[in-house]
Amino acid sequence: MNVLMVKLLVDVHTPGNGKTYEFQLDGDMPAERAAAQIIQAVRETENGAIELAPLTATLCDETARSRVPLDLTLRAAGVKSGHRLILV
């Protein structure tokens, strides 16, 4: 039995540095893990020059105008391809 992953292509804005990044994320990934993955990728891209703590970071879905509950998967939280997320 093949299991297909739901891939979401989203833009993630980080107000701390005023930049927006494109991410392809697994829709079945818990939002908490997605936030940690995003933080790690931004740190690597910016050579560590951004201060975000995975334990206190929050994802907001600008498109849906709501906070993404960290205990839900991205898909269960209503995040869809094309959405713009804000990492705060």
Image: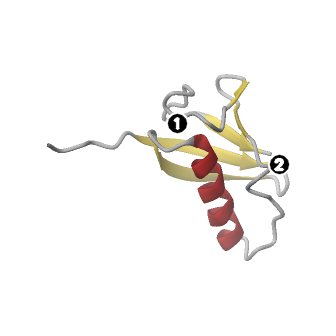
Asked whether 12 or 27 is in front, the reply is: 27
Q: Local crowd at mark 2 within 10 Å, few (<14), some, or many (≥20)?
A: few
The image shows residue 31 at horizontal and vertical percentages of 59, 42
Check disc 1 and report its element: helix, strand or loop: loop
* Label 1 packing within 10 angstroms: few (<14), some (14-19), many (20+): many
Q: Is residue 49 left or right of residue 66?
A: right
In the rendered image, residue 30, in percent from the top left (x then y), is placed at 54, 42
Residue at image x 68%, y 59%?
Answer: 39
Q: Quadrant of the N terminus?
A: top left
Quadrant in which residue 85 is drawn? top right
Inspect the image, locate mark 2, and give the three-letter code of the amino acid beneath it: Pro
- Return the x and y of residue 54 as percentages of the image width and height: 73, 56
Label 2 element class: loop
| Quadrant assignment for the C terminus | top right
Does residue 49 sit above or below 30 in this rendering?
below
Type of the residue with mark 1: Thr
Q: What sort of colour scheme is used for the picture?
A: secondary structure
- Numbered tag placed on residue 15 in the rendering: 2
Mark drawn on residue 73: 1
Residue found 63% across the figure and 46% down from its top: 32
* Picture quadrant of residue 4: top left
Residue 45 in the image: x percent, y percent? 66, 70
Considering only vertical position in the picture, is 66 above or below 52?
above
Rendered view: 74 above or below 26: above
Marks 1 and 2, the one that precedes in the sequence = 2
Residue in view at x 52 percent, y 36 percent: 73
The numbered mark at residue 56 is none
